[in-house]
Image (cartoon, helix red, strand yellow):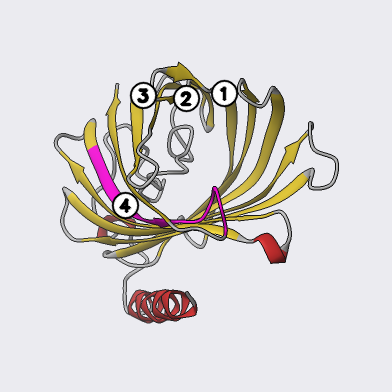
């Protein structure tokens, strides 16, 4: 496992070094989504732990998408249709209905805000709060996250989420640390390659993770598909599950 992090650290270092040679001109940062302002850095969304619209979204933006997640060894499928709406510039709300096979597993509501941009608009940061009710465990949970994305160069970008999950039904392990790291390589205006690591830490001895190499393809400026898969220990840190997932997105 440590070799994966060493490899990711090396790739990130190369990307940062290459960014030092890039101009600070935003027009050299690659494609910008048609629904975004030119002063907002274009940074892809992670596939599994996605955003409530990109940070800095303009008022009135609307998105529908569905994530489908297959657990190959367990043999079950989770899928989650959702709708996202920016009700103010930089602020958005999301309604999501996660299913496991054909049964509703959760009810989920999320709010997101944007703090602003830094480093000549190469970095953008904000926050996200997620509330959910798990029907199977009859549990209420909240996720509180700090969000940070940075355009390193015309080819490289990264996005990070750091926060905590509060499970109100738990007593011994009520709080769970959350960390999501994603690194993206912009192969072309339509094709992006990414690597996402999801981490959950109730405590170090029970650290859980999921690794997801992924491909993002934009059919149009408003419609895209994300596909990826890899090993996961989010459900059971002692057993590796292999997963395949895809997310279909359409923005209005």
Residue assigned mark 1 = 108
Residue 80 visible in the displayed image: yes
Query: Which quadrant is home to the C terminus?
Result: top left
Q: Check if mark 2's residue and mark 4's residue have beta carbons within 8 Å.
A: no
Q: Could you say which disc has been placed on residue 98 in the image?
A: 2
Q: Percent x, y for residue 187?
A: 18, 61
Q: Percent x, y for residue 68?
A: 33, 33
Q: Nearer the viewer, residue 48 or 2?
A: 2
**Residue at disc 3, secondary structure:** strand
- Circle nearer the N terminus (3, 2): 3
Does the magenta stretch mainly form a helix, a strand or a loop?
Answer: strand
Q: Could you say which disc has been placed on residue 63 in the image?
A: 3
**Residue at disc 1, secondary structure:** strand
**Residue occupying image coordinates x 68% and y 41%:** 144
Question: Is 239 one of the magenta-colored residues?
Answer: no
In the depicted structure, whether residue 71 falls above or below residue 248: below
Residue assigned mark 4 = 229
């Amino acid at each position: 496992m440590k070799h994966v992090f060493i490899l990711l650290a090396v790739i990130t270092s190369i990307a940062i070094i290459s960014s030092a040679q890039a101009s600070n001109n935003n027009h050299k940062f690659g494609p910008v989504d048609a629904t975004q302002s030119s002063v907002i850095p274009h940074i892809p969304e992670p596939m599994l732990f996605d955003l409530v619209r990109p940070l800095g979204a303009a008022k009135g933006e609307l998105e529908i998408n569905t994530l489908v997640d297959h657990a190959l060894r367990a043999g079950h499928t989770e899928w989650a249709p959702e709708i996202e709406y920016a009700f103010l510039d930089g602020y958005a709300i999301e309604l999501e209905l996660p299913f496991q096979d054909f049964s509703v597993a959760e009810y989920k509501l999320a709010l997101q805000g944007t703090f602003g941009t830094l480093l000549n608009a190469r970095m953008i940061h904000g926050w996200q709060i997620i509330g959910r009710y798990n029907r199977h465990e009859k549990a209420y949970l909240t996720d509180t996250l700090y969000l940070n994305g940075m355009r390193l160069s015309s080819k490289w970008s990264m996005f990070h989420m750091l926060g905590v999950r509060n499970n109100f039904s738990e007593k011994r392990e009520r709080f769970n640390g959350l960390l999501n790291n994603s690194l993206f390589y912009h192969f072309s205006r339509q094709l992006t390659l990414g690597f996402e690591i999801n981490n959950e830490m109730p405590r170090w001895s029970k650290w859980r993770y999921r690794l997801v190499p992924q491909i993002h393809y934009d059919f149009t400026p408003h419609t895209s598909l994300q596909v990826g898969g890899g090993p996961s220990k989010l459900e059971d840190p002692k057993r590796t599950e292999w997963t395949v997932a895809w997310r279909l997105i359409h923005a209005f």
